[in-house]
Amino acid sequence: MIWAYETGGPVTSSPAVADGAVLVGSHDGRLHVVDKAGKPLWVFPTGDLVFSSPALSAAGVAYVGSDDDHLYALDLTGQKALWRFQVGSCPTSVGVGPQASRCDVDAGPTIGPDGVIYTGGDAVYAINPDGTLRWRFATGGHVSASPALLADGTVVAGSQDNLVYGIAADGTKRWDFRAGDDIESTPAVAEDGSIYFGSDDHKLYALAADGTLLWAFNAGDDIRASPAIGSDGTIYVGAFDSLLYAIRRDGTLAWTFRAGDRIVSSALVDAGGAILFGSQDDRLYALESDGRPRWSVALGGDVDSSPALEADGTVYVGCDDHKLYALRARAR
């Protein structure tokens, strides 16, 4: 371990790495910006828990959502908010329960090549870089997972209404696909346009770019992690049955690795093919591309945060023990 930075609440947000800084949200309701030595640079308060993983634009603007029903745009250099956008008009904006959570901004955000920001809450939203609404696409359930983008500009977003939507760049529906239960897994898009996502119906789905089903793989429990795609096209995803699955492009199983508890953390595949992910057994794992363990490290609580990797090999990950960790990845 290089360092541990303590926040005021569990850290399920995935870190984002900027020039000279690491950003992460916390259940203390704040976005924390720390330097590469783990020292605080800036703390930005929102009005509720932050599950959202921050995103950084090429211009150095950070975007993060909060369970106070707002998406924030933040100037990291000036350490100030540029704007905030209210998602929906839910009668209760903070707290727990269906009415309080439907408009929570947990999804993403995802930044398009033209700077448009995509997120979710009570619907799927496209927001212009100046904070004005481009379009809103209504869904039948809460959108908690980040939208993904296809090469032609189609926005792919899952919802707790059991549907994945393909939305055109102008906000109109191109297609939808129905799974058997809620979809809280962020879609992953392969180079050929294939779309992979998990569902609470225990399946990993593969769709063509037009939304037609290619195959469905049966896991042993809910899949809420986002799939990661290796250089050879292998798809890696964890499930609530404590297994990390490696699935070939044709939908057949390559191998599994058993952790000690549920896997919510989305895997990261590094340039050398190692697969990094966290588990609710309080460990961060690194596996070889064939599923053999490379290393693991025990942290102080559930690791639901997805790891982020620096070019120098530093791994950043959040933990339920309220901390953001910086770790040195070990070579094979």
Image (tube, rainbow, N blue to C red):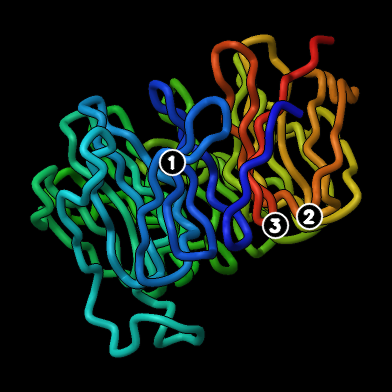
Residue named by callout 2: 301
- Image point 81% across, 28% down: which residue? 254
Q: Distance between the residues labelled 2 and 1?
A: 21 Å
Q: Mark 3 = which residue?
A: 320
Between discs 2 and 3, the one toward the N terminus: 2
> The disc labelled 2 sits on which kind of residue?
Gly
Q: Is 165 rendered above or below residue 35?
A: below
Q: Position of residue 161 (x, y in %)?
A: 45, 72
Image: 68 above or below 120: below
Up-down relation of residue 21 to residue 86 (above or below)? above
Badge 1 or badge 3: first in the primary sequence? 1
**Marks 2 and 1, the one that precedes in the sequence:** 1
Name the residue type under label 3. Answer: Asp
Is disc 3 placed on a helix, strand or loop? loop
User: Which residue is the site of mark 1?
Assistant: 33
Give residue 231's quadrant in the image. Answer: top right
Q: In this view, does 42 lie to the left or right of 319?
A: left
Q: Nearer the viewer, residue 115 or 174?
A: 115
Where residue 292 sits in the image (x, y, percent)? 90, 23
Q: Is residue 50 above or below residue 325?
A: below
Q: Residue at x 38, y 63 (%)?
A: 66
Give the Cα distance between marks 1 and 3: 18 Å
Residue type for callout 1: Val
